[in-house]
Image (cartoon, rainbow, N blue to C red):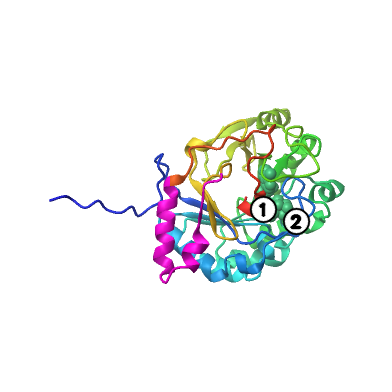
Amino acid sequence: MSASVPSPQTLIDSFGRAITYVRLSVTDRCDLRCIYCMAEDMTFLPRSEVLSIEELVLLGKTLCELGVTKLRITGGEPLIRKGIIELVQQLGKLPLEELCLTTNGTHLAQHAQALKDAGVDRINISLDTLNPERFKQLTRFGDIDQVFAGIKAAQVAGFQHTKLNCVALKHYNADEAVDLVKFALNEGLDISFIEEMPLGRIDGHGRAAEFVSSAELRDQISQHFSLKPDDVTTGGPSRYWKAGGYSSRIGFISPHSENFCSSCNRVRVTATGKLILCLGQENSADLRAAMRNNPQPESALRSALLNAIQYKPEKHDFNLNDEPKILRFMSMTGG
Ligand code: SAM
Ligand code: SF4
């Protein structure tokens, strides 16, 4: 008699990595146009192509059943998605270890308390500079005061370990690394510096010319603070350090200089429901089709996820000097 092989119940890829963290993009739209993320002229998707709130909730629930413990809501700018609070309220009821959100902060002042009440555990806020003019240049027209108001509102609402995300570009903001760290430490915020990734074709700057490594930034920062590596892991790609006398964490996300693929525990879902198995590769699966074209969307979604995870690539191979291999913008993929 042959023993039946139990079907897998959790998302484990063919390299044995357990996928427990999913970044869920809830819109491809944004109220800013950061120069590293978007082209000046963007065409956004028709609404019918974007997952509905109900589909996003079903997806969250199914992922949770398959062993996902951490969801990050992102975009585009998640806080301009219609129904975002309702979505967060639904996802907040799932038995997750962490529900997180990444935002540019422009609409956070209005929503911080509602997000906290709905069960969001942690927020990342993008901030690449402290200078209002530079902020305008980097985002093409943004108002930095809205972001400062958002940071304040997150603090008032009681969020802990709020993290600033800063994409470092050599000729735009790399000289501000120390000031950004001082700001974060004084405000009790964590901060991560991100090496720019070659996602999508942008017009204004060469990605290779703007490259600044995490090590260079760490060197700058360590001239002002004594940095000690911190073992903490938040389940993401950041490697953390601490400055003597402060509790804040200083992280570095280094897709080029310190490859982190072997410990990758995450996948992304685009606003159209495409499961992106690796940020730097094209392997994907259409979860929207699984939900929309089947009489039993729940089981179809589950099978699609379990099947797709076997195709997660071993690693990304970003090359800053070539034409971008991945033509999806980060705003499409969900950063
Ligand atoms: N709009 C929200 C925000 O800006 O935080 C969420 C979406 S945004 C795509 C998520 C993160 O991706 C941001 O921290 C942003 O700085 C980062 N990002 C965008 N394009 C990038 C790129 N080409 N390389 C590295 N990080 C990028
Ligand atoms: Fe918008 Fe975020 Fe991309 Fe900036 S990084 S353009 S805020 S989606």
Magenta part of the protein: which range? 282-310
Main SS of the magenta segment?
helix
- Which label sits on residue 42? 2
The reply to whether the magenta stretch includes residue 307 is: yes
Q: Earlier in the sequence, mark 2 or mark 1?
A: 2
Question: Is label 1 in a helix, a strand or a loop?
Answer: helix
Q: Residues within 10 Å of mark 1 (few under 14, many from 20)?
A: many
Q: Can you give x and y, in whole percent of width and height, for residue 61 in the image?
A: 46, 64
Percent x, y for residue 37? 71, 48
Q: Is residue 252 above or below residue 332?
A: above
Indicate the amino acid at tag 1.
Ser
Indicate whether residue 115 is drawn in magenta: no
Callout 2: few (<14), some (14-19), or many (20+) C-alpha neighbours within 10 Å?
Answer: few
| Disc 1 CB within 8 Å of nearest ligand 2 atom | yes
Can residue 65 be seen here? The reply is no
Residue lying furthest right: 133
Q: Which residue is drawn at 54% across and 36% down?
A: 260
Residue 170 picture quarter:
top right
| Residue under pointer 1 | 331
Of tags 2 and 1, the one toward the viewer is 2
Query: In percent of the image, x 42 and y 46: which residue is there?
Result: 310
Q: Marks 2 and 1: CB-CB under 8 Å?
A: yes
User: Total of numbered circles in the picture?
Assistant: 2
Q: Give how far across and how far down residue 226 sits, in percent.
A: 66, 30
